[in-house]
Image (cartoon, rainbow, N blue to C red):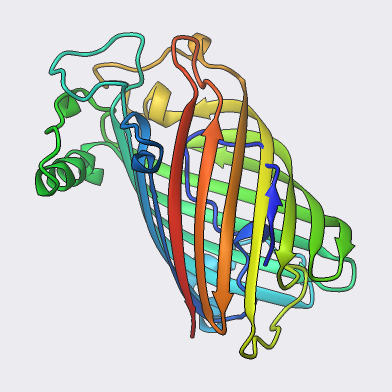
Amino acid sequence: MVLTLLPFFVSAQEIDNTLSYKNINCDRYFRLNYENDFFSATDIYYTQGVAIELVSPSLSAFPLSKLLLQPHYGGTRYGIALEHDGYTPTSIGHDEILYGDRPFAATLTFKSFQISIDTIKKQRFSTTLTVGIIGPAAGGAEMQTGIHSALNNVIPHGWPNQIHNDAVLNYQVDYEKQLVSLGKIFSIDGDAIARVGTLSDKAGLGFTLMMGYFDSPFQTNIAKGKNFRLYAYDHPQVNVIGYDATLEGGLFNHSSPYTIASSQLNRITFQNRFGFVLEYRRIYLEYFQSYLSREFETGTYHVWGGIQLAFGL
């Protein structure tokens, strides 16, 4: 595990679960991810993301796993995840469309992924296949309305104007290489990402800085013992954006009442994520915050946070 102090990348804020700063050094684990801009005292743009994730060697036989590229490094982990993400404009109190603002959008996706680790050359190669839907069928309106009602918060308006239903099919490849390592207390690695599909097209470069006391994400099946692991990380990343369905609408369905024109997108974005991780035996707890630069010309930057809880099985 690691301290990451420098990330650059995002568009369509999917919960990335394969990079080194999210490493869990065992082949079987369950993880719950929850992200919300509540942690930054806002309620705009990428307003919430929830994902449940399972990793197990038995998933190598899962049908979608057969479609995942892998370089056959010494150790490979296989996983699946179910994810729900929601996006809103800067105000949820209006029935009418807020032109120049972010569209309402929601996605519900299923992911199959693999993480290959080369313990000799200290590199990682991950692939993720994502299938699902964007639009009202993803249940974004019901999710946000239910949460706000339970908390006696402002009931959201404007969801009838959300991005309409369309298919999600995406393929993502990540590569990471360790650059500097000082035992269990300091590490820097570089990473590259490429994503294509109907939800998001992008390429990015970043690096991860980790400090504290942690297990290397470039090793496999480390015995945890009874000791604590405590570290911080920072991960900056810069992306080149080709397409974002949560802003531009689906690739096939062009009936959405409001979208951001392709010409209005910022093609280069910067994101930084930093967090703190506590591990004890096979329990993993993380708190983080992310910053994302302006995604479209009339937009603004955005900050959100999240927590992750994982258990080794």
Asked whether the viewer can see residue 95, the reply is yes
Residue drawn 57% across the image and 17% down it: 266
> Against 150, is 22 above or below?
below
Q: Nearer the viewer, residue 121 or 306?
A: 306
Q: x, y (%) of residue 183? A: 85, 70
Residue drawn 47% across the image and 40% down it: 13
> Against 122, is 263 above or below?
above
The quarter in which the N terminus is drawn is: bottom right
Say which quarter of the image contains residue 299: top left
Residue drawn 71% across the image and 70% down it: 214
Residue drawn 35% across the image and 15% down it: 101
Q: Nearer the viewer, residue 245 or 65?
A: 245
Say which quarter of the image contains residue 217: bottom right
Q: x, y (%) of residue 108? A: 33, 49
Q: Nearer the viewer, residue 167 or 272?
A: 272
Asked whether the viewer can see residue 133, the reply is no
Q: x, y (%) of residue 247? A: 41, 24
Q: x, y (%) of residue 295? A: 51, 22
> Against 263, is 163 above or below?
below
Q: What is the total number of numbered labels drawn onto the structure image?
A: 0
> Left or right of 186: which side holds 246?
left
Q: Nearer the viewer, residue 29 or 301?
A: 301
Say which quarter of the image contains residue 210: bottom right
